[in-house]
Amino acid sequence: MDTPNKLILNYNDIPAMPNVMVKALNVIKDEGSGLNDLADVMCYDQALTTQVLKLVNSAYYGFAQQITSIGKALPLLGMDQAKNIIITFAMKPMLTARGGKAMWEHSIRTAVGCEHLAKEFKLMDSSDAFVIGFLHDIGKIVLNVKNPVVYRKIEEFVNKGANVLDVENMFFGTNHSDVGFLLAKKWQLPVVVNNAIKYHHNPQNSSMANFAYIVYVADKLAQDKKKPIELDEEIMKNSNIQIDNPEAYKETIHNKAAVLLASLAR
């Protein structure tokens, strides 16, 4: 059995953070940098530039005028929204290749859900919430790379109602939350992101519980529409997110995510 540390530190095929994402996050972290510096990073990646312009002209953002250049797009988006777009596009090939279409769509729905809940309950910045939600399952990439055949078996168990962490621990001796936490640390992502990834199934154990609860709830609401919503009453007891009508929230999140997914698929 592998420990999460062994998987991250010793396994040669652990994915590196996409290069454009590294450059963009470095610009964003540098207080002396601005939108022009971010535009320079994006303009070197023609595919990213094309996709960003398609997205900002889509119904998801709903800008009144046609936006024809990154230079015009970024002031309208702002640094935080631009960061979200870059991370989303940069991670798409990795998520779809390693986790399949279902993981990609679930990641987008959870990101949109976190953004929506953050705005609704004012527990954190909604832009940061989007990133946390989008990256919450990145540990699954590592487990899938390690042994895709075994991970397909795990998915079969989970689809039949098994607890995902229990099954992962049984087959791998670790789980996607712990592995994702270490991968996020390796990528030098912010502490709040790392923490929410680690505790999104057990937010009550987190030292940053508000953030972990947002991902926990969004993750449940982002599940397939046919699946019942399974918010654990004991876990939710100490949460600052109290939802009277989970089905209505689920419908809103799925509808918003559908618009974004349609834009990203172009």
Image (cartoon, helix red, strand yellow):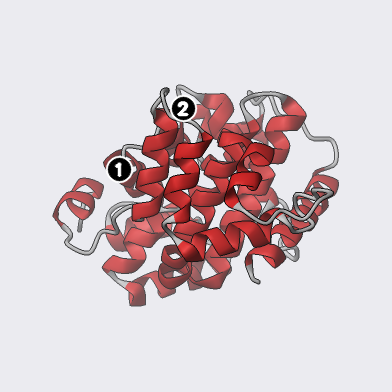
The residue located at (79%, 35%) in the rendering is: 243
- Residue type highlighted by circle 1: Leu
Say if mark 1 contacts mark 2, CB within 8 Å: no
Q: Which mark is residue 182?
A: 1
Question: Which quadrant: the N terminus?
Answer: bottom left
Q: Is residue 230 visible?
A: no
- Residue 122 in which image quadrant: top right
Callout count? 2
Q: Is residue 140 visible?
A: yes
Q: Is residue 91 above or below residue 220?
A: below
The residue located at (42%, 74%) in the rendering is: 152
Mark 2: give few (<14), some (14-19) or many (20+) Cα within 10 Å.
some
Q: Position of residue 110 (x, y in %)?
A: 62, 50
Q: Position of residue 79 (x, y in %)?
A: 56, 35
Residue ID for mark 2: 206
Left/right of residue 5 with respect to residue 114 in the rendered view = left
Mark 1: give few (<14), some (14-19) or many (20+) Cα within 10 Å.
many
- Cα separation, mark 1 vs mark 2, equals 16 Å
The residue located at (48%, 48%) in the rendering is: 135
Q: Nearer the viewer, mark 1 or mark 2?
A: 1
- Residue type highlighted by circle 2: Ser
- Looking at this view, name the residue that lies furthest to the left: 10
Left/right of residue 60 with respect to residue 73 in the rendered view = right
Q: Is residue 60 above or below residue 26?
A: below
